[in-house]
Amino acid sequence: MSLAQPAGVTTTRRSFAGGIHPPSSKQLARDQPIEVVPTPKLVRVPLLQHVGALCEPVVKSRDEVLVGDLVGKSEAPVSAFVHASISGKVAKESAATLPNGRRVPTVPIKAGDEQLEGQELFDDIYGGEWPTLRLDLPTADLILQSVRDAGLVGMGGAAFPTHIKLALNPDRPIDTLVVNGCECEPYLTADYRLMLEAPRPIITGALLAASAVDARRIVIGVEDDKRQAAEALSTAAEATGIEVRVVKTKYPQGSERQLVPMLTGNNVPANGLPLDVGVVVVNVATAAAIARAVLRGKPMTHRIVTVTGRGVETPKNLLAPIGISYGELIEAAGGLSSDAARILAGGPMMGFTLGDLDTPVTKGTSGITALTRDDLQQIEETSCIRCGLCADACPLNLVPTRIALAARKGAWSLAERYHIHACMECGCCAYQCPAQIPLVQLIRMGKAHLAGA
């Protein structure tokens, strides 16, 4: 892999069609440094935290485990191993309902006496030396094996197994690795704090990922409301050949279909992937996890979660073990305020309403947003007035109201003709709809019906 000299921080002035500018509300948590959550008494590690097949447990009740030990695996082509996030004793297997409504088995672990805590835990995950200029790059096979063994998935929300994304395909060579640091979802600041506080493992992970896919170019995209993060990454990337490019703040700029054209000039086909235009995209947190997996042999056991919104007392960015409950993270942020009315797993645009605070955090959990009654004030749903605002906002040039209303009426062939499966459920249409039609929920319902048909 040979990279050109870096261009430093550059600004991309183009934008994409559609999209919206909702209030970012990031000021609630953006200046809060990452805090390490004290080890909980119990974690419940879900055996499905990823796109793909369910893992089978490889431990049983009363087994003693150490943090990082394998607790679930699958030999299916698409899956991701899961590991103990704390040291302790395995309890009887239980089940949990995830925010997307899927009920999955979990491996409960009761905490033992010996745990890494506080700064020691943060340093174990993100601290220490991360080589960039004198990085002895392992072979692609070794990188992939390390990533697979570590159970890495996309940490930007998609949770697609990373070892599959980084696997070489001789029929589709990769030219560019894009590292996504946009974090365009309102309220959430976990990636922003990671870029500020631990930019070096991101850079090291990007170099390793690019080596695995044989990319000659690495570009990191950061929205222009996060210029401090862009500067931190640029300093960490000095003399590596990595480009840090600032793009316009606009939702959903962090989507692959919007970010790839902004950074490479190549449009991703409507029914295709970035791979089809010679690009692989990884999130900044995923890049840091790649560095830890390959160079230190450590699996994914913790992640940064933003707990925010006007419905929590003290918004924070928390480094937490996988399997801790949502409720415990909310308590770590001071608890709910008196006017809290709805809790979301994720942000307000693409998040799911949380029905149970005992729900465990997974590898794909980037945030918890607590909204107040004032935040939820809305007009009662009325009939579509054919204003076209949803179509204007759609970054994929769809007509969301046609798709949603076809799904509501059960006109499944019509919904497919309107490209229901192309919708990425970003929520731009619902945000703009003056009739308050639950467009995204209807489209999700339609997709679920067609998947089970």
Image (cartoon, rainbow, N blue to C red):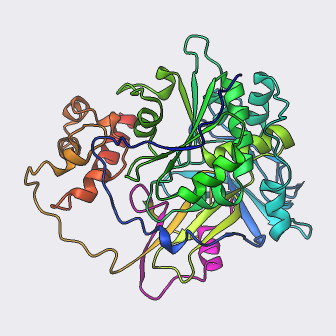
Q: Residue furthest left?
A: 385
Of residues 413 and 283, the one nearer the viewer is 283
Segment colored magenta: 323-351
Name, please, the residue furthest toward the bottom.
Answer: 338
In this orientation, does residue 438 appear?
Answer: no
The quarter in which the C terminus is drawn is: top left
**Snapshot quadrant of residue 1:** top right
| Residue 444 visible in the current orientation | yes
Q: Measured along the vertical axis of the image, is residue 453 above or below residue 83?
A: above
Q: Quadrant of residue 21?
A: bottom left
Does the stretch in magenta take in 412?
no
Q: As displayed, is residue 382 above or below residue 331?
A: above
**Residue 328 counted in the magenta span:** yes
**Picture quadrant where residue 29 is located:** bottom right
Please give left or right for residue 344 compared with residue 283 in the image: left
- Left or right: 101, with 236 as reference point: left
In the picture, measured across the screen, residue 67 lies left or right of residue 337, that is: right
Q: Position of residue 162 (x, y in %)?
A: 64, 35
Between 446 and 302, the one nearer to me in the picture = 302
Spot occupied by residue 15 in the image (x, y as percentages of width and height): 35, 43
